[in-house]
Image: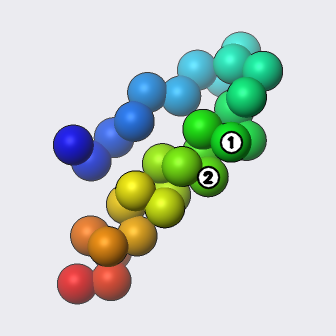
Amino acid sequence: EYILPCKRTDPGLDGCIQRAFNHLKPYLIK
């Protein structure tokens, strides 16, 4: 799963973006 759902109104948006980025990092490094 490439995209994790992050809502702009989510109070934990920063954390969600951080997790999504860390989740994508292995795919981006290839």
- Dot 2 lies on which element? helix
Task: Specify whether 1 is left or right of 15.
Answer: left
Residue 18, which numbered label? Answer: 2
The quadrant of the image that shows the N terminus is top left
Query: What residue is at 27 percent from the left and 47 percent from the top?
Result: 2
Q: In which quarter of the image is residue 7?
A: top right
Residue 15, which numbered label? Answer: 1
Q: Badge 2: how crowded within 10 Å, few (<14), some, or many (20+)?
A: few
- Residue 26: x and y in percent read 32, 73
Name above or below for residue 25 compared with residue 24. below
Query: What residue is at 78 percent from the left and 21 percent from the top?
Result: 11
Name above or below for residue 5 compared with residue 22. above
Q: Quadrant of residue 28?
A: bottom left
- Residue 19: x and y in percent read 54, 49
**Callout 1–callout 2 Cβ contact below 8 Å:** yes
Q: Which residue lies furthest to the top in this view?
A: 9
Task: Specify whether 1 is left or right of 16.
Answer: left
Type of residue at label 2?
A: Gln
- Residue 30: x and y in percent read 23, 84
Please count the marks in the image.
2
- Residue 17: x and y in percent read 60, 45
Name above or below for residue 29 compared with residue 13. below
Type of residue at label 1?
A: Gly
Q: Badge 1: how crowded within 10 Å, few (<14), some, or many (20+)?
A: few
Query: What residue is at 71 percent from the left and 15 percent from the top?
Result: 9
Per the model, the C-alpha gap separating discs 1 and 2 is: 5 Å
